[in-house]
Image (spheres, grey):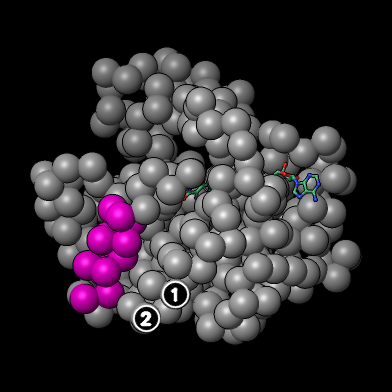
Amino acid sequence: MTTRKPSFSFEFFPPKTPAGMEKLRTTRKQLAQLRPEFFSVTYGAGGTTRDRTLETVLEIQAEGFEAAPHLSCIGATPDSLRELLDDYRQRGITRIVALRGDLPSGMVETGEFRYAADLVAFIRREYGNQFRLEIAAYPETHPEARSARDGLINFKRKADAGADSAITQYFYNADAYFHFVDECEALGVALPIIPGIMPIYNYTQLARFSDACGAEIPRWMRKKLEDYGDDDLPSIHAFGLDVVTALCDKLLRHGAPGLHFYTLNQSAIVSTLWQRLGLR
Ligand code: FAD
């Protein structure tokens, strides 16, 4: 693992409404005080949030912070990607979270970019090193991978296509992460793999996300969260803060090269985590 200064970053989704944009500005103001390395902004697969992602990224840049748009390639063409990437370059965007994405319902054509590795290779071929590229990693195995081994080999392929670093899907079992990092190292994958951290906001939402993305909520946590139910948010938040603080602390103590927080456009829980971890 790395001895470089840890990298901390915060992820947002692009709001749909002016009220959501305003709320995100307030969230950003609070999180900006923590001086993250960068903020990232998600992208609806198939380009559904293209304009809102860019608008949010530009606002963040104008506030003096680095902002990385996520970019999913499923359904894209070389021309549509060139148009977008040229625009990004002109606007001074230098970091991208490069993804395959999932097909939006009703869309059946994947296009010629079937995997994120195709996108990484395309950007490196056409743009050289003009963009820093982050890719997604799955310590608990991506739900579509035929096996854990296959998922790992596919991850290596994507890293070898020219990625600079990786951000993981969230997990609550630190051993899954350490094991994945060890396996990557054994395969010669040398890029930093930053744990993605999902604070616990409410149980129903977390269970829905986890079912969709294959991130495991350990049974003991699920049982505790079920006991609280969604009506008892203070208890859920207190429990979630204890669990996630312990997870982050363990990850950092054992050499994780940083943390990427899935903020869901909220600042309070992440700020409390930050204080509890004693991060600067
Ligand atoms: P890939 O790396 O292409 O992998 C997808 C699947 O294909 C995996 O099962 C992999 O094992 C398999 N695979 C890869 N290459 C091959 C091959 N050559 N042959 C056979 N199988 C192969 N989604 C969004 O829509 N918007 C976002 O903004 C977004 N942000 C994300 C941020 C992070 C940090 C993470 C972890 C995920 C994010 N996602 C986002 C979700 C992501 O798009 C999905 O998990 C998607 O299903 C896979 O994307 P990927 O880039 O990991 O795909």
The circle on residue 94 is none
* Residue 230 is at least partly visible in this image: yes
Can the viewer see residue 271 in this picture? no
Q: Which region of the structure is painted magenta?
A: 51-62
57 in the magenta segment:
yes
> Residue tagged by mark 2?
90
Q: Is residue 188 left or right of residue 231?
A: right
**Observer-nearest of 203 and 89:** 89
Residue drawn at (25%, 79%) of the image: 64
- Asked which secondary structure carries label 1, the reply is helix
Residue 139: in magenta span: no
| 68 versus 48 height, above or below | below
The kind of residue tagged 1 is Asp
Quadrant location, the C terminus: bottom left
**Residue 94, horizontal then vertical, whole percent:** 45, 78
Q: Nearer the viewer, residue 67 or 46?
A: 46
Q: Are marks 1 and 2 in contact (CB under 8 Å)?
A: yes
Image-quadrant location for residue 186: bottom right
Distance of label 1 from label 2 (alpha carbons)? 6 Å
**Please, what is the dominant secondary structure of the magenta stretch?**
helix
Percent from the top left, x then y, of residue 191? 70, 72
- Report the disc number at residue 86: 1
